[in-house]
């Protein structure tokens, strides 16, 4: 199949199964279970794990006719960010802090302080 855009003729992959497969993967993977885990009940409290889930997909094609080639890929990443605690009819979100994030924040603060001290000494 070819499509015309202005004067250029561009080959378009006629096989829609690639897009259909990606759509099926997203439909089965992108749901609330990927973000909220199964609730855990213990000692009168219900704990619901919460995660940040990211998906990425891409694809492309090159060539014309018999020489036309295409491909694609994707990936997913899930990170625990906290949990929801439900107790006696009230709920609260409790974040989980990544030690790496805290260390980065501390280092950035120290670097900013050093930069500020150096700048004040230079411009006196």
Image (cartoon, rainbow, N blue to C red):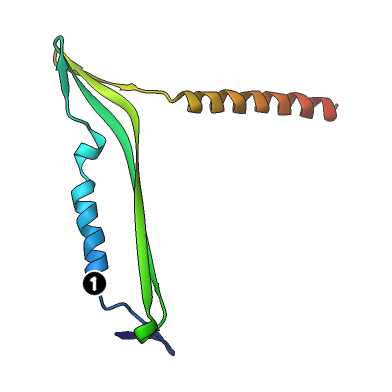
Q: Is residue 64 above or below residue 51?
A: below
Which residue is pictured at 24% across the width and 39% down the height? 34
Q: Is residue 35 left or right of residue 59?
A: left
Secondary structure at badge 1 equals: loop
Q: Is residue 107 left or right of residue 66?
A: right
Which residue is pictured at 26% across the width and 65% down the height? 19
Q: Which of the two residues, 122 or 47, is positioned nearer the viewer here?
A: 47
Q: Is residue 21 above or below residue 70?
A: above
- Within 10 Å of disc 1 (Cα), the crowding (few <14, some 14-19, many 20+) is few
Which quarter of the rendered picture does the C terminus lie within? Answer: top right
Which residue is pictured at 25% across the width and 23% down the height? 84
Q: Is residue 38 above or below residue 18?
A: above
- Which x, y percent locates residue 30? 23, 47
- Which x, y percent locates residue 60? 39, 69
Q: Is residue 24 above or below residue 83?
A: below
Q: Which residue is mark 1?
A: 16
Judged from this view, the residue extending furthest toward the bottom is: 7
Judge whether residue 54 can be spotted in this image: yes
- Which x, y percent locates residue 16? 23, 72
Which quarter of the rendered picture does the N terminus lie within? Answer: bottom left
Which residue is pictured at 37% across the width and 80% down the height? 68
């Amino acid at each position: 199949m070819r499509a015309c855009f202005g004067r250029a003729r561009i080959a378009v992959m006629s096989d829609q199964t690639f897009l259909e497969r990606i759509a099926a993967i997203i439909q089965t993977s992108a749901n609330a279970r990927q973000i909220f885990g199964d609730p855990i009940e213990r000692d009168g409290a219900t704990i619901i794990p919460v995660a940040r889930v990211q998906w990425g997909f891409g694809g492309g094609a090159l060539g014309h006719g018999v020489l036309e080639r295409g491909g694609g890929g994707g990936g997913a990443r899930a990170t625990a960010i906290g949990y929801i605690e439900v107790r006696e009819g009230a709920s609260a979100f409790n974040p989980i802090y990544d030690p790496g994030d805290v260390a980065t924040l501390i280092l950035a603060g120290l670097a900013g302080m050093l930069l500020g001290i150096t700048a004040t000494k230079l411009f006196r």
